[in-house]
Amino acid sequence: MISKGTAQDVIPVLKSKNLKSGVSYQDGQFDDSRLALNLAQTAIQHKAVVLNYFKVVDLLKDDANNVCGVLVLDIETNIKHKIKSKVVINATGVFANKILKLNGREREPLKIVPSQGIHLVLDASFLQSDTAIMIPKTSDGRVLFIIPWHGKVVVGTTDTPNVKPKYEPKPLAEEIDFILNTCKVYLSNAP
Ligand SMILES: Cc1cc2nc3c(=O)[nH]c(=O)nc-3n(C[C@H](O)[C@H](O)[C@H](O)COP(=O)(O)OP(=O)(O)OC[C@H]3O[C@@H](n4cnc5c(N)ncnc54)[C@H](O)[C@@H]3O)c2cc1C
């Protein structure tokens, strides 16, 4: 537990209105895009063949109707290739239901229920600290993070259910408003 005064020493932009005290805790941070690249590099070191911009468009089946590979589209050349394998792992995130459908599983209950979330990137001046803020209870009953990130500040997230998964999702106006309005309650210089 840290007192109101100490909290503002660490994060000078914290609004003092209604602030009684805070809780200080330690957490880890990593660069998710670097992690994805490092994962691919490590897989290559272990003799994996990593294919980027290759989209699975169908599943290959053997005579017993078991999955035995994938039909992929090379997005850069528009050429399709058959890739045979002993095992196919469906790790396509919010798109996983699409691959299940390719396997004739469209009548089963959905395995993944997609939602979308956004971050906003703000100028570092809005936080002025190396310490992140975690707001434990937002108006929609979740948490909001305000985090120093590569010389900027990342704020998020939202959780909007029932969205159609897209490769290039766009933030909704109400998501942007929710983040800005929540920040306004805690930051003395409202973004
Ligand atoms: C704004 C936001 C903030 C978040 N913050 C956190 C956080 O702080 N901590 C946390 O733990 N989680 C967080 N999450 C959740 C986390 O990002 C996801 O749970 C996680 O990325 C899911 O990983 P995945 O590997 O299952 O899917 P993804 O990371 O979505 O990977 C699926 C991959 O499959 C590929 N793909 C899809 N269809 C095909 C196809 N037909 N053929 C070939 N490839 C295909 C996609 O291009 C993608 O690269 C956050 C999510 C959002 C949106």
Image (cartoon, rainbow, N blue to C red):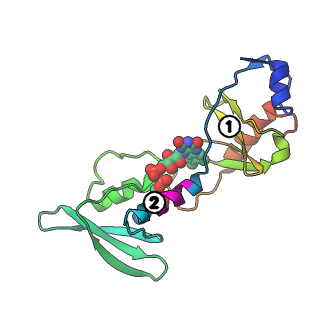
Q: What amino acid is at disc 1? A: Phe
Q: Along the horizontal axis of the image, is 60 left or right of 31?
A: left
Numbered circle sitting on residue 175: none
In the image, residue 100 lies at what x, y percent? 32, 56
Q: Earlier in the sequence, mark 1 or mark 2?
A: 2
Q: Which residue is mark 2?
A: 42
In the image, residue 163 lies at what x, y percent? 52, 50
Q: Is residue 77 above or below residue 151?
A: below
Find out if the beta carbon at label 1 lies less than 8 Å from the nearest ligand 1 atom.
yes
Q: Most extreme residue toward the left, as rendered?
A: 64
In the image, residue 146 lies at what x, y percent? 72, 39
Q: Would you say the residues marked 1 and 2 are in contact, meaning their CB atoms lie under 8 Å apart?
A: no
Q: Along the horizontal axis of the image, is 162 left or right of 141?
A: left
Corner quadrant of residue 68? bottom left
Q: What residue do we see at 42% from left, 56% from top?
A: 92
Numbered disc 2: secondary structure: helix
Q: Is residue 11 above or below residue 86?
A: above
Nearer to us in this view, 94 or 69: 69
Numbered disc 1: secondary structure: strand
Q: Quadrant of the C terminus?
A: top right
Q: What residue do we see at 36% from left, 46% from top?
A: 110
Q: What amino acid is at disc 2? A: Thr
Magenta region, residue range: 35-41
Q: What residue do we see at 61% from left, 51% from top?
A: 31
Nearer to us in this view, 25 or 188: 25
